[in-house]
């Protein structure tokens, strides 16, 4: 069994988008996150030796791969926070503040 892609959930609330990736057994230094041109890219770089083992029996494979997502128009690409705990990577992407109409005073 080769390495496999990772599972994701995305939740939207009033102020942000939350992306959770199931990364059991992955060390945080193997995870790369980038935001460019309105896209978020999540890459897991599993060492080749982890994927190249000769197993007599295997039910799970090392997590590996890259996934790219187009950010919603109201997502703030400058406000992405990442945490990792208990095998789950959590990215919180704040929403842009809604622009309020500008009132113009008459002088």
Image (tube, rainbow, N blue to C red):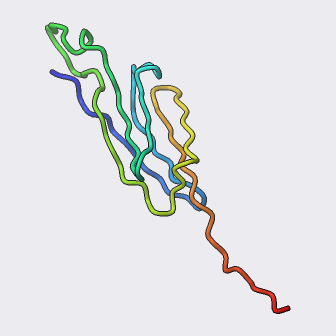
Q: Quadrant of residue 30?
A: top left
Q: How many marks?
A: 0
Residue drawn at x 81%, y 92% is 106
Please state which of residues 14 and 65 is positioned toward the viewer in this rendering.
65
Q: State the image quarter where residue 7 is shown.
A: top left
Quadrant location, the N terminus: top left
Judged left or right of residue 62, residue 95 is right
In the image as oriented, which residue stretches furthest toward the bottom?
106
Determine the residue positioned at 30% across, 14% down. 47
Is 76 situated above or below 44? below
Which residue in the rendered view is the most extreme toward the right?
107
Residue 39 position in % (x across, y down): 39, 49
Left or right of 47? Residue 52 is: left
Spot occupied by residue 61 in the image (x, y as percentages of width and height) = 24, 22
Q: Is residue 99 above or below residue 101?
A: above
Q: Residue at x 57, y 40 (%)?
A: 81
Q: Is residue 23 above or below residue 101?
A: above
Report the front residue among 4 and 57: 4
Name the residue nearer the viewer: 48 or 62.
48
**Residue 32 screen position, x and y as percent:** 42, 29
**Considering the image in quadrants, where does the C terminus appear?**
bottom right
- The image shows residue 66 at horizontal and vertical percentages of 30, 35
What residue is drawn where x is 35% and y is 32%?
43
Q: Along the horizontal axis of the image, is 38 left or right of 13? A: left
């Amino acid at each position: 069994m080769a390495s496999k892609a990772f599972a994701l959930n995305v939740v939207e609330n009033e102020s942000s988008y939350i992306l959770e990736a199931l990364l059991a057994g992955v060390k945080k230094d193997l995870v790369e996150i980038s935001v460019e041109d309105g896209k978020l890219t999540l890459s897991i770089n599993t060492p080749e030796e982890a994927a190249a083992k000769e197993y007599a029996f295997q039910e799970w494979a090392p997590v590996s791969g890259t996934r790219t997502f187009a950010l919603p128009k109201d997502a703030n690409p400058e406000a992405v926070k990442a945490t990792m705990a208990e095998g789950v990577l959590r990215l919180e992407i704040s929403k842009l503040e809604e622009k309020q109409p500008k009132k113009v005073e008459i002088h």
